[in-house]
Amino acid sequence: MKTLKEISCGQTVKVQKLTGEGPVKRRIMDMGITKGVDVFVRKVAPLGDPIEVTVRGYELSIRKADAEMIIVE
């Protein structure tokens, strides 16, 4: 299993599962990142934080720590 943090630029992946609990998981879900949604990785900052993605037509920045909680295929 891979996490969103391990995906390279230009790839589109499908969210498999969200790990993490409480407010962190809620914040990820509030961004529209839920099971089954496609995530396109647009850009990864030089040090890997943040990761810029497109989800449901919205451009978002995700912290590396949050990206580790998103399991993708």
Image (cartoon, helix red, strand yellow):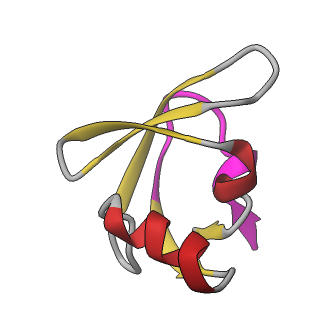
Query: Residue 58 or 11: which is nearer the viewer?
Result: 58
In the figure, is residue 47 to the left or right of 52? right
In the figure, is residue 24 to the left or right of 6? left
Which of the 4 quarters of the picture holds residue 54? top left
Q: Residue at x 65, y 34 (%)?
A: 8
Label tally: 0
Q: Residue at x 71, y 30 (%)?
A: 49
Q: Identify the residue at the far top of this view.
A: 46
Q: Which quadrant of the figure contains the N terminus?
A: bottom right
Q: Is residue 12 magenta?
A: yes
Vertical arrangement, residue 50 with respect to residue 27, above or below: above
Residue 12: x %, y % from top left: 44, 47
Residue 18: x %, y % from top left: 57, 79
Vertical arrangement, residue 68 with respect to residue 58, above or below: below
| Residue stretch in magenta | 1-13
Q: Residue at x 82, y 20 (%)?
A: 47
Q: Residue at x 65, y 57 (%)?
A: 66
Q: Identify the residue at the far left of this view.
A: 57
Query: Residue 19 or 41: which is nearer the viewer?
Result: 19
Query: Residue 23 or 72: which is nearer the viewer?
Result: 23
Residue 60: x %, y % from top left: 38, 38
Which of the 4 quarters of the picture holds residue 3? bottom right
Q: Which quadrant of the figure contains the C terminus?
A: bottom right
